Structures are given as C-alpha cells and as structure tokens.
Amino acid sequence: MARSRLVACLFTAHFLCCINVCMPDGGESRPRDQSTVSESSKRFRAEFLEDWPQLPGEPYFDPTTPVNVTGLVGHPVTLLCKVKNLQNRTVSWVRHRDIHLLTVGRYTYTSDQRFEAQHKPRSEEWALRIRSPQRRDSGQYECQISTTPPIGHAVYLNIYECQISTTPPIGHAVYLNIVEPETEILGGPDLFIYAGSTINLTCIVRHTPEPPTSITWTHRGKAINFDSTRGGISLVTEKGTHSSSRLLVQAARTSDAGAYVCGPDNAQTATAKVHVLTGETPAAMQGRGQRWAARWQLSALLLIVWSTYTHIADITLYSHS
C-alpha cells in the first residue's frame, strides 16, 4: 500500500535529525498501535526527545536564565539554560567563537572531554558544564531550541585567573627545607665487643614521611633468625617521628662478629661491623668504635715513649753525679 511520509526535522547549527512518521493516504492522522513502533524508535523518543506532553504554544526561554557567568581558571563552571514548554524539541549548546556544536539534548558532540551536557529528566534546565576551564574558553555561548527557525539564548562566559595585585607589590617569604630519610646505627661503622658481653645495636630512622612499617636486620647477608638454637637474640622496635630498632645479642662469641645491616622498608639501609675481642686484647668497650681503639693505642705509645725518655734521663743524671 502506498504511503506518504511526513518528515519532522530538528535543526541546530551543525545538527540535522529527521524522524519519519508514517501516515495513511489522505493525510488524516489517526491513532497508531504502539506495537508497530520499533524498539529503537521508542528508545529514541524516551531518551532523546523525552516524549514531552503536547502543550499549546511555542517553547520559550525562562526570563530568569542568567546571561553572564564568571569562573576561575581550573575550577568547573556551569552555563544554565531554562526552557519552558519544550514539548518534543531539543536543546543544544553552541560556541560562537568557532560556531562549534557542543551538545544536543543530553549528549555531548565534541572531542574536548572538558565539555559535558547535563540535564535532569523532566526538568526545564539544560546545562553545559566545563571542567577545568581556561582563559581561552571565555566568550559567547548560545542555548538553542530546535524550532523553525531555531531560537537562541546567549550566555557570555568570563574566565579569570586568581591573582592578588597590590601597589607596590607585597610578598610573603616561605622557606622550604628538603630532607632525605636517613638510617644510622649508633656507634658505627665499627663496634668492638668483648666476648661474653652483650652486643647492643641501635638503629635510628629519621625524616621519613611515615614511620617504617618494618625494620629488618641481617648478619653477614642473612636474615637474623630469632628462633635459632643459638638463643639470646631479641629485638625491640619503637615507631614515631624518629623510629628505632634495638638488636640485642647476649653472650657474644666470635661467630657473632661481622657486618650487621639495619633495613627499614621506607629508607636507606645502615651497616655496622662488629668485632668480638677475646683474651687480654686491649680494645674499646661497646659503642666506642675504631676511634676509641686508636686513641688507646696512641696513649699506650705515648706512655712507652715517656717511660723510655724518663729512664734515659735518670741514667744521664746518675752518670753526672
């Protein structure tokens, strides 16, 4: 059966959408069975046109719709358009600078991801939201209704940068001090311990954004086993602005000598070498290190020199007498 077609066209600056509505010959309209309407057509009317009820009169803009909008660079801004009696028309946003179509209905038609169409179903507000606006986005935008011919409402957008200007300029100085996390074993890098005494290694962790989650110890490259048959090994850890971990090894023996490494999980490691001394070997007590041992050796040398010199002097005086 021959059919005539009524083509309803919705126009915007760069948009043309045509909907074919079938009518019987003779041009008289009659109710249509909804079952004959395809699912895609019903979806289009529900989502795109919203199938507003037919009200008398043409659509028009709410006179309270703002015509000037001001925003700051980098802060989201929204251009609002209020339309009365829209019926089955569509609302579009166009940028005048380059006659660029930005949105149609609730859909965005630009590759610039900062622009977004916003509309709450059944409301009269059609908004254009701009995320992170820049100075170049300033200018005139137009909200258009797809009547014949289209009607529009101009909105001017001003985007400013946040600045403080005084004459003469004033300033406020801020001193920035950057510190790096650091790890230290007290008394290192060398510790001298008598055999049979307690090895006490204290590791300090400073200047970390947060206290370390864990602080591990190794001896000669191997993780220390606190449950080993050797026994007498314990660990005390305190976390805070300056975190600390204290390793105690009782009854030191020669096998306990070597490099100990303290390793926090958010800072550099620190190493100390432990020397276990046996017999009558003169050495510094725990925590004094090589510098103390060197001082003892120097003192002993001076004592020997002084004793020798005194003995020679006594012999010389005796000869003269």
Image (cartoon, rainbow, N blue to C red):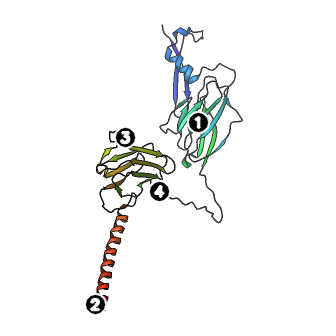
Residue extending farthest to the front is: 321
State which mark lies toward you, 3 or 4. 3
Helix, strand or loop under label 2? helix
Could you say where residue 246 lies in the image, as x and y percent from the top left? Answer: 43, 48
Task: Using the image as rendered, state which of residue 153 and residue 124 is in the foreground.
Answer: 124
State which mark lies toward you, 2 or 3. 2
Could you say where residue 63 lies in the image, as x and y percent from the top left? Answer: 71, 35
For label 2, count other residues whose C-alpha is less than 10 Å away and answer few (under 14), some (14-19) or many (20+).
few
Helix, strand or loop under label 4? loop
Q: Which mark identifies residue 226?
A: 3
For label 3, count other residues whose C-alpha is less than 10 Å away and answer few (under 14), some (14-19) or many (20+).
few
Q: Which mark identifies residue 260?
A: none
Q: Identify the residue position indicated by label 2 in the image.
A: 319
Residue drawn at 41 percent across, 50 percent down:
267
For label 4, count other residues whose C-alpha is less than 10 Å away and answer few (under 14), some (14-19) or many (20+).
few
Q: Identify the residue position indicated by label 1 in the image.
A: 128
Between the C-alphas of marks 3 and 1, the distance is: 65 Å
Task: Count every numbered label the image shows and give the total.
Answer: 4
Mark nearer the N terminus (3 vs 4): 4
Mark nearer the N terminus (2 vs 4): 4
Between the C-alphas of marks 2 and 3, the distance is: 68 Å
**For residue 116, what is the image quadrant?**
top right
Q: What residue type is labelled 1?
A: Leu
Q: Which amino acid does label 3 sit on?
A: Phe
Could you say where residue 272 lies in the image, as x and y percent from the top left? Answer: 35, 55
Between the C-alphas of marks 3 and 4, the distance is: 34 Å
Between the C-alphas of marks 2 and 4, the distance is: 69 Å
Q: Answer with left or right where residue 184 lies relative to residue 282.
A: right
Helix, strand or loop under label 3? loop
Mark nearer the N terminus (3 vs 1): 1
Task: Using the image as rendered, state which of residue 210 and residue 283 is in the foreground.
Answer: 283
Q: In this view, does 308 lie above or below 70?
A: below
